[in-house]
C-alpha cells in the first residue's frame, strides 16, 4: 500500500527524522537552534528559522503519527495523540485537560477554528503588561501571513445541525453569531479533526510548517522528551533529553544531549513552565508557572426533536461573542459560545453518570446537541489563573482553583446555553453538573440553575486551551519573557508558544500562537544571522 | 512486560501509597484512624495481573495486563454491571465476555495515562480493594467478589452525591474510565446510535485499504 501524503513522501525522500525508540546508544547532536515541541509555536519557528538558512533540530516528546494512522477511531487517538492518554486533569482532578502530544502538537487534534487575537485583548496587554508593540495594527500583517500559510478562511459549507442549533438559538434571542474561519484545504466535512484529520485537509503544523522545516534540512527527533536545559554561566549550553520506548511513554534509558547557540522552548503551557522549572533556570521573582490560564469550559447538552448526528461534519463552524466582551475587557468574566463534536467516547466522558440512566442518555446521542462556554480568564484581579508545579517524578501539573468570580461566569453561562437550546427548539436540556436533571422548559432549567451548587467536581469542567505560565511583559518582576519571547534572564533562550500569553486570549488560540511565533522567529532569525 | 515487584517492595509501596493517598487526598479526622492501621498491614498483591489463571478463561488469554491487578479486576467486575447498566447484554455469558473485554480496554487505556496518573489510580484502587478502607471509606462490606450490582450501585451513588469533593472525583474517575472504554469501542458504537466513520470515506481513504 503506498501513501502519497506529504509526510510519507517526505520520509521517502530522506527527511532527517529519528524515532527516539530506535536509538540504542546515548549521543550528542548539535545545531544552530534546538526547538522543544512541534506544535503551533514550534512548527512555525522551525520553518522560519530553517528557511533562513539556520540549522535546526526539533525535539518532540510525542510520536510521529500521520495519515496512515488516522483511522477516525477515538480510543486509539486519545491514547496516542493526547497528553497522558487523555487523562490529564488539573491537580485536584476537577478539570479535564485536553492537550496534544504528538508531532504537530495540539494542532494535530484541534478543531480548526481560526481566530485572530481580539483587539481588546491586545490593547489590554499593551496597557497592563507594557506590550505596546503588539497592537492590533502591528500584529495585522502577521495574522494575514499566517492565515495564508494555514489556509484559514470562513467555512463556506452549511454548518452541521449541532452548530446550526447554536445559530438558530442566537438568532431567535437576538444574540450575535458568526461563521468560524477554519484552517482547511479541501475539507471533506467529516468531523474527525479531534482524532487526527484522515484526509490531510487540516492545515495544522503537521501539513504545513513541519514539512516546510524538514524540506529545509531541519532534523526531527520524536519520541524524545526534553528533560533539562543545562546552564553554563549565563547561557544554556545543552538540552538533556530522554528517549521513549515504542509505546511512547516508557523511557528507554537512552539519553540525547543537544547542543546549540540558541534554544527555543515551545512545549506549550504546562509543558514549557515544567521544563523551565525542572531546569532550575534563573527566576528571581518566582514567575515561572504562575498565571496559567485555561479558558475554563462548561457545557450543556440538549435532546433535539430532529436527528443531529453531532459526530459528523466540521466540528465547529458557528460561534457567538455576544457575552465575550459585553462587560468590558476587565469586568465580570466574559465567555465565548461554541459547539463541541460529540463522538461516543467523548460524550461518555463528558456526560456524567452511570447505570440504566446513563445507558438511556447515551443511546440518544444522534439527537444530542451541545453548547460550550469558554470563559475568558486572566483579565481581572479575581482571576489570577493557576500555577504549574512539578510532581515527584518531575512531570508538570497545573493547580487551577476556580474563584468566585469564575463561578459566577460559569453559572451565567449555564443560563445562556440552556436558554439558547430551548430557543432553538430543544425538547430537554441538561447542564453538565452532577446534580442536573433533564429539564423540559427554559423556566424549569432556569429555576434549577439558580439552585445548582458551584463546586469543583460537581460542575463538569474542561479545557482545550492552555495558556500562560511563561508570561510575557516588559517588567521582569511580573513576567518570564519579553514581547519577543526572549527570556528576561537567559540570553540564548526564547519561548514561542501559548505559554507566553499574559492572559487568556478570549478566542481559540491557535492563530495567536502561530502569528506571535512567526513574528518572534523572524526577529530571532535576523538576530542569529548577524 | 509487567514489572514484578519483589514481595517486600510490593508491600512497602502498597502501604506507602495508601498512606500518601490518605494524607494528601483524603486527610481529615474521618480517615486518620485508618492510616496507622493500614500502614502496618500487608495485603493484596499490586503487581499487574499479567495473565489470568485458567479459571478465568473468559478473558482473552492472549491479553497481558499491564496495570490492573487481580484485585482491580474483581473491583471492575463488580462495578461494571452497575456502571454500564442496561447497556450490557442480558445473556450471562455475553455479559461476562463484554465485561472482560471492557476491563482489558480499561487496562490498555490506563497504560497510556503514564506514571503520574497511574500512581493516583493505584492509590484509589488499593484503597477500594483493601478490606479495612473498603469498609470504612467506601462503606462496602463484602469483598468486591461478593458485591451485588445493587450494592455497587449504592456505592457509586454515595460517592456521586457525597459532599466531599474527593469522593465525587473518585466517582468520576471510575465511571469515566469505564464509560469511555466501553462506548468508545467499535463493537459498542451501536449502543449510542453511532454508525461509525462514514462508509464512503472509509471506502476511498488509503489507510483503510488492506496492505
Ligand atoms: C481537542 C483540542 C481542540 C482544539 N481546538 C482548537 C481550535 O479549534 N482552534 C484553536 O485555535 N485552538 C484549538 N485548540 C488549541 C490549540 O491547538 C493550541 O492552543 C495550540 O496548538 C497551542 O500551541 P503550542 O505551540 O503552545 O502547543 P502545542 O501545539 O500543544 O505543541 C506543544 C508540543 O510540545 C510537546 N512537548 C511538551 N513537553 C515536551 C517535552 N518535555 N519535550 C518535548 N516535547 C514536549 C507536546 O507533546 C506538543 O506536541 C484545541 C486544542 C485541543 C486539544
Ligand atoms: S472535518 Fe475536514 S479537517 Fe476535520 S477531519 Fe474531516 S476532513 Fe479533516
Image (cartoon, coloured by chain):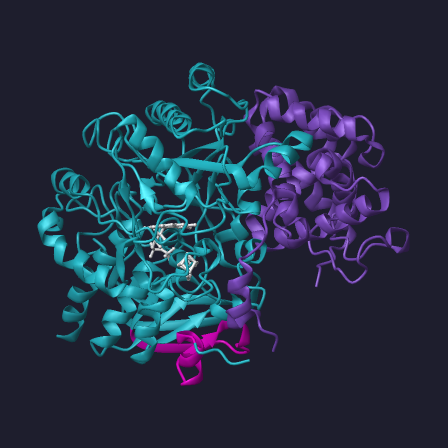
| Residue at 71% from the left image edge and 45% from the top image edge | B12
Does residue A450 lie above or below A465 as drawn? above
Tell me where residue B206 appears, x and y as whole percent.
Answer: 52, 73
Does residue A71 lie above or below A393 as drawn? below
Quarter occupied by the N terminus of chain A: bottom right
Q: Looking at the image, how many numbered discs can be counted on the residues?
A: 0
The answer to whether any part of residue A495 appears in the image is no
Quarter occupied by the C terminus of chain A: bottom left
Q: Which chain is purple?
A: B
Tell me where residue A461 appears, x and y as whole percent.
Answer: 45, 34
Is residue A527 highlighted in magenta? no
Residue extent of the magenta highlight: A5-32
| Residue at 40% from the left image edge and 31% from the top image edge | A401
Residue at the extreme right of the image, as rendered: B55
The residue closer to the viewer here, A258 or A401, is: A401
| Residue at 35% from the left image edge and 62% from the top image edge | A204
Q: Quadrant of ligand 1?
A: bottom left
A87 sits left or right of B22 in the view: left
Does residue A53 lie above or below A275 as drawn? below
B95 sits left or right of A159 in the view: right
Tell me where residue A190 appears, x and y as whole percent.
Answer: 45, 56
Amino acid at each position: 500500500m503506498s501513501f502519497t501524503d506529504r509526510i510519507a513522501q517526505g520520509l521517502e525522500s530522506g527527511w532527517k527524522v529519528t524515532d527516539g525508540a530506535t536509538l540504542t546508544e546515548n549521543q550528542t547532536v548539535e545545531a544552530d537552534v534546538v526547538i522543544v515541541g512541534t506544535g503551533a509555536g514550534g512548527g512555525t519557528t522551525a520553518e522560519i528559522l530553517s528557511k533562513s538558512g539556520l540549522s535546526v533540530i526539533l525535539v518532540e516528546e510525542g510520536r510521529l503519527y500521520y495519515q496512515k494512522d488516522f483511522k477516525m477511531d477515538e480510543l486509539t487517538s486519545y491514547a496516542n495523540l493526547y497528553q497522558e492518554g487523555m487523562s490529564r486533569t488539573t491537580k485536584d482532578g476537577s478539570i479535564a485537560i485536553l492537550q496534544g502530544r504528538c508531532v504537530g502538537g495540539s494542532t494535530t487534534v484541534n478543531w480548526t477554528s481560526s481566530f485572530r487575537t481580539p483587539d481588546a485583548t491586545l490593547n489590554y496587554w499593551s496597557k497592563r503588561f507594557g506590550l505596546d508593540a503588539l497592537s492590533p495594527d502591528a500584529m495585522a500583517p502577521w495574522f494575514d501571513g499566517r492565515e495564508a500559510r494555514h489556509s484559514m478562511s470562513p467555512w463556506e459549507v452549511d454548518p452541521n445541525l449541532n452548530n446550526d442549533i447554536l445559530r438558530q438559538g442566537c438568532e431567535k434571542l437576538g444574540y450575535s453569531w458568526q461563521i468560524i474561519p477554519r484552517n482547511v484545504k479541501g475539507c471533506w466535512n467529516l468531523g474527525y479533526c479531534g482524532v487526527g484529520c484522515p484526509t490531510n485537509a487540516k492545515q495544522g503544523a503537521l501539513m504545513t510548517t513541519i514539512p516546510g522545516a524538514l524540506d529545509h534540512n531541519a532534523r526531527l527527533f520524536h519520541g524524545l522528551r526534553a528533560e533539562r536545559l543545562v546552564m553554563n554561566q549565563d547561557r544554556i549550553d545543552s538540552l538533556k533529553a530522554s528517549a521513549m520506548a515504542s509505546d511512547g511513554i516508557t523511557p528507554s534509558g537512552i539519553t540525547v544531549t543537544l547542543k546549540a547557540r540558541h534554544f527555543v522552548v515551545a512545549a506549550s503551557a504546562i509543558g514549557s513552565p515544567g521544563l523551565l522549572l525542572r531546569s532550575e533556570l534563573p527566576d528571581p521573582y518566582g514567575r515561572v508557572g504562575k498565571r496559567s490560564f485555561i479558558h475554563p469550559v462548561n457545557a450543556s447538552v440538549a435532546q433535539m426533536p430532529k436527528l443531529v448526528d453531532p459526530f459528523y461534519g466540521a466540528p465547529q463552524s458557528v460561534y457567538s461573542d455576544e457575552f465575550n466582551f459585553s462587560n468590558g475587557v476587565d469586568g465580570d468574566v466574559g465567555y465565548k459560545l461554541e459547539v463541541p463534536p460529540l463522538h461516543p467516547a467523548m460524550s461518555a466522558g463528558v456526560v456524567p453518570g452511570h447505570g440504566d440512566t446513563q445507558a438511556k442518555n447515551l443511546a440518544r446521542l444522534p439527537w444530542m446537541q451541545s453548547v460550550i462556554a469558554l470563559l475568558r480568564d486572566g483579565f481581572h484581579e479575581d482571576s489570577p489563573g493557576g500555577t504549574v508545579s512539578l510532581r515527584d517524578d518531575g512531570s508538570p501539573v497545573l493547580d487551577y482553583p476556580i474563584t468566585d468570580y469564575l463561578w459566577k461566569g460559569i453559572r451565567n453561562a449555564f443560563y445562556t446555553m440552556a436558554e439558547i437550546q430551548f430557543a432553538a427548539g430543544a425538547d430537554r436540556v441538561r447542564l453538565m453538573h452532577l446534580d442536573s436533571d433533564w429539564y423540559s422548559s427554559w423556566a424549569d432549567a432556569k429555576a434549577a440553575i439558580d439552585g445548582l451548587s458551584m463546586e469543583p467536581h460537581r460542575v463538569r469542567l474542561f479545557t482545550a486551551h492552555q495558556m500562560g505560565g511563561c508570561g510575557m511583559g516588559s517588567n521582569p518582576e511580573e513576567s518570564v519573557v519579553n514581547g519577543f519571547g526572549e527570556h528576561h534572564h537567559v540570553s540564548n533562550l526564547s519561548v514561542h508558544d501559548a505559554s507566553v500569553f499574559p492572559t487568556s486570549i478570549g478566542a481559540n488560540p491557535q492563530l495567536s500562537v502561530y502569528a506571535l511565533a512567526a513574528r518572534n522567529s523572524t526577529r530571532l532569525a535576523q538576530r542569529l544571522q548577524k | 512486560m509487567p514489572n514484578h515487584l519483589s514481595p517486600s517492595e510490593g508491600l512497602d509501596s502498597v502501604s506507602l501509597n495508601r498512606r500518601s493517598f490518605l494524607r494528601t487526598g483524603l486527610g481529615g479526622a474521618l480517615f486518620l484512624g485508618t492510616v496507622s492501621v493500614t500502614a502496618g498491614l500487608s495485603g493484596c498483591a499490586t503487581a499487574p495481573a499479567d495473565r489470568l489463571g485458567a479459571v478465568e478463561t473468559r478473558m482473552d488469554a492472549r491479553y497481558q495486563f499491564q496495570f490492573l491487578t487481580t484485585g482491580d479486576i474483581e473491583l471492575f467486575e463488580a462495578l461494571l454491571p452497575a456502571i454500564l447498566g442496561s447497556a450490557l447484554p442480558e445473556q450471562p455469558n455475553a455479559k461476562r465476555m463484554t465485561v472482560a473485554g471492557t476491563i482489558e480496554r480499561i487496562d490498555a487505556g490506563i497504560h497510556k495515562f503514564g506514571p503520574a496518573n497511574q500512581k493516583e489510580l493505584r492509590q484509589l484502587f488499593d484503597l477500594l480493594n483493601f478490606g479495612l478502607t473498603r469498609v470504612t471509606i467506601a462503606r462496602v462490606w463484602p469483598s468486591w467478589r461478593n458485591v451485588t450490582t445493587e450494592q455497587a450501585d449504592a456505592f457509586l451513588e454515595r460517592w456521586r452525591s457525597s459532599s466531599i469533593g474527593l469522593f465525587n472525583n473518585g466517582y468520576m474517575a471510575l465511571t469515566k474510565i469505564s464509560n469511555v472504554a466501553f462506548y468508545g469501542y467499535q463493537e459498542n458504537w451501536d449502543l449510542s446510535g453511532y454508525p461509525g466513520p462514514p462508509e464512503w470515506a472509509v471506502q476511498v481513504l488509503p489507510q483503510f485499504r488492506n496492505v
